[in-house]
Image (spheres, grey):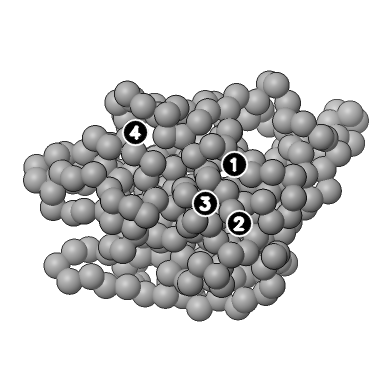
């Protein structure tokens, strides 16, 4: 079913001996003017966002080929170099119970929370946003294995954590506001919106000095499109296989390039040269 309006309540979490990592506390679809709803740390049956790990931890780059790279995993060990453990949130059984509905070409706003009074706690990192289509129906992501999607990149923010995320901290929601423009020229259908944050230089020797991968996945139904198939100009990858063997670097974001800006214009605007 498509999600009704659920008014936001920001959740705060502290873990003993560990600085809290981040999670998506709320999102507004479309933004502005749409419904603001709870996202993670909410029962799956009551949200359109797939879960976050039990300690809001990271997927280590040593395990980049793990299914956890797609949407995260329940068990993300800390203070050790160990693989993330199931359940993996890309699994169909870990789908959220709702789907947020918005026309193509609109904007989504995420609220990224972490340490109380601080928001996302880490000083640096790159950010990227992907879409992966589940199907043409309005609830097709609600029982969907996200590792089977063809993912394309719609936003890329090198050094996005210090340059974009931290300046957008809002104490009224105790989190960082992050806006995502949705393309206009993609087919009507259900998509998983995947936010990826990469943290560098944050782990210790016991954790293998790995790059920290934070994937977050929400479910959207994009309606009102004038196109029926995804353009062949849009490059896609599978995850996690598309990342297999990569060495993550601060200067290069993994995955395909961001789709051409023309795909964010309506067909009418594009034909008029606007």
Query: Which residue has dot 1 on it?
Result: 131
Q: Secondary structure at mark 3?
A: helix
Query: Which residue has dot 2 on it?
Result: 142
Question: Residue 103, image x and y in percent?
Answer: 77, 52
> Disc 3 or disc 4, which is closer to the eye?
3
Say which quadrant the C terminus sits in: top right
* Real-space Cα separation, disc 1 to disc 4, in angstroms: 19 Å
| Among numbered discs 4 and 2, the one appearing first in the sequence | 4
Q: In this rendered view, identify the residue nearer to me: 177 or 25.
A: 25
Above or below 45: residue 83: above
| Among numbered discs 1 and 4, the one appearing first in the sequence | 4
Question: Residue 160, image x and y in percent?
Answer: 43, 44
Q: Residue furthest top?
A: 233
> Disc 3 or disc 1, which is closer to the eye?
3
- Disc 1 vs disc 4: Cβ atoms closer than 8 Å? no
* Real-space Cα separation, disc 3 to disc 2, in angstroms: 8 Å
Q: In this rendered view, identify the residue nearer to me: 145 or 242.
A: 145
Q: Residues within 10 Å of mark 3 (few under 14, many from 20)?
A: some
- Mark identifier at residue 65: 4
Instruction: Give the quadrant of residue 219.
Output: bottom right
Instruction: Give the quadrant of residue 136.
Output: top right
Q: Identify which residue is drawn at 59% across, 54% down.
A: 143
* Real-space Cα separation, disc 3 to disc 1, in angstroms: 17 Å
Residue 195 in the figure: left or right of residue 235: left
């Amino acid at each position: 079913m498509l999600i009704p309006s659920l008014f936001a309540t920001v959740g705060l979490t502290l873990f003993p001996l560990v600085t809290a990592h981040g999670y998506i506390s709320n999102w507004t679809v479309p933004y502005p003017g749409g419904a603001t709803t709870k996202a993670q740390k909410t029962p799956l049956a009551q949200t359109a966002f797939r879960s976050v790990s039990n300690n809001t931890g990271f997927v280590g780059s040593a395990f980049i080929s793990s299914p956890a790279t797609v949407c995260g995993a329940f068990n993300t060990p800390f203070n050790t170099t160990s693989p993330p453990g199931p359940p993996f949130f890309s699994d169909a059984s870990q789908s959220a119970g709702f789907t947020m509905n918005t026309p193509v070409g609109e904007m989504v706003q995420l609220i990224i929370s972490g340490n109380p009074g601080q928001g996302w706690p880490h000083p640096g990192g790159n950010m990227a946003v992907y879409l992966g289509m589940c199907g043409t129906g309005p609830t097709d992501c609600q029982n969907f294995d996200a590792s089977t999607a063809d993912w394309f990149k719609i936003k890329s923010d090198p050094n996005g954590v210090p340059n974009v995320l931290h300046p957008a901290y809002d104490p009224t929601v105790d989190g960082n506001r992050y806006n995502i423009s949705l393309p206009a020229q993609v087919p009507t259908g259900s998509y998983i919106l995947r936010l990826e944050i990469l943290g560098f230089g944050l782990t210790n020797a016991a954790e293998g000095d790995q790059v920290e991968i934070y994937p977050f996945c929400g479910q959207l139904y994009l309606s009102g499109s004038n196109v029926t198939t995804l353009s062949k100009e849009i490059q896609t990858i599978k995850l996690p296989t598309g990342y297999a063997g990569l060495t993550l670097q601060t200067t290069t974001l993994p995955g395909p390039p961001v789709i051409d800006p023309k795909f964010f214009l309506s067909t009418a605007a594009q034909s008029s040269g606007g």
